[in-house]
Amino acid sequence: MKTSFPRPRDNEPFAWGLSGSEPVEIWERFSPAYETQLERLMITLSELGFTPTIGGSGSEDGEYVRAQYNDNDRIVFFHHLEDPADARFLSSLDEESLRSWIVKTWIDG
């Protein structure tokens, strides 16, 4: 099933809480920056031959992307999205750096 962005908001809690009354930070689910980053990650993973899925919303550790590599089912990408440090890291990567990081860390690693 293809995910469309921005996603409709659910009633699940936020792993790290919110900085205000509405999600605005890149690690706060459903903020514009979060949704843009998640969409970018999902597209990049798909283009590299992964099958990404979103899970963990409302859990203590927060939402994540898990993606199995289609050419080798033992290669699985996994990254938390609601952790502020992880979200900042992803946002620091331009398109080429994001692709390179995924290839070096999961496919070639």
Image (spheres, rainbow, N blue to C red):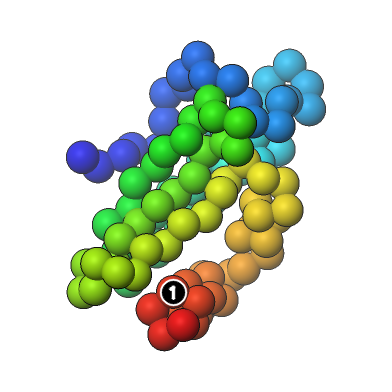
- In-front residue for pair 74/40: 74
Does dot 1 land on a helix, a strand or a loop?
helix
Outermost residue to the front: 74
- 26 left or right of 52? right
Q: Which residue is mark 1?
A: 106
How many marks can you see?
Answer: 1
Outermost residue to the bottom: 108
Q: Residue at x 53, y 70 (%)?
A: 98
Residue 31 x, y percent position in the rendering: 60, 33
Q: Residue at x 68, y 21 (%)?
A: 22
For the N terminus, the image quarter is: top left
Residue 80 x, y percent position in the rendering: 56, 49
Residue 3 x, y percent position in the rendering: 31, 39
Q: Residue at x 42, y 38 (%)?
A: 55
Q: Residue at x 73, y 25 (%)?
A: 18
The image quadrant of residue 72 is bottom left
Residue 88 vs 103, above or below: the answer is above
The amino acid on which the numbered mark 1 sits, given as a three-letter code, is Trp
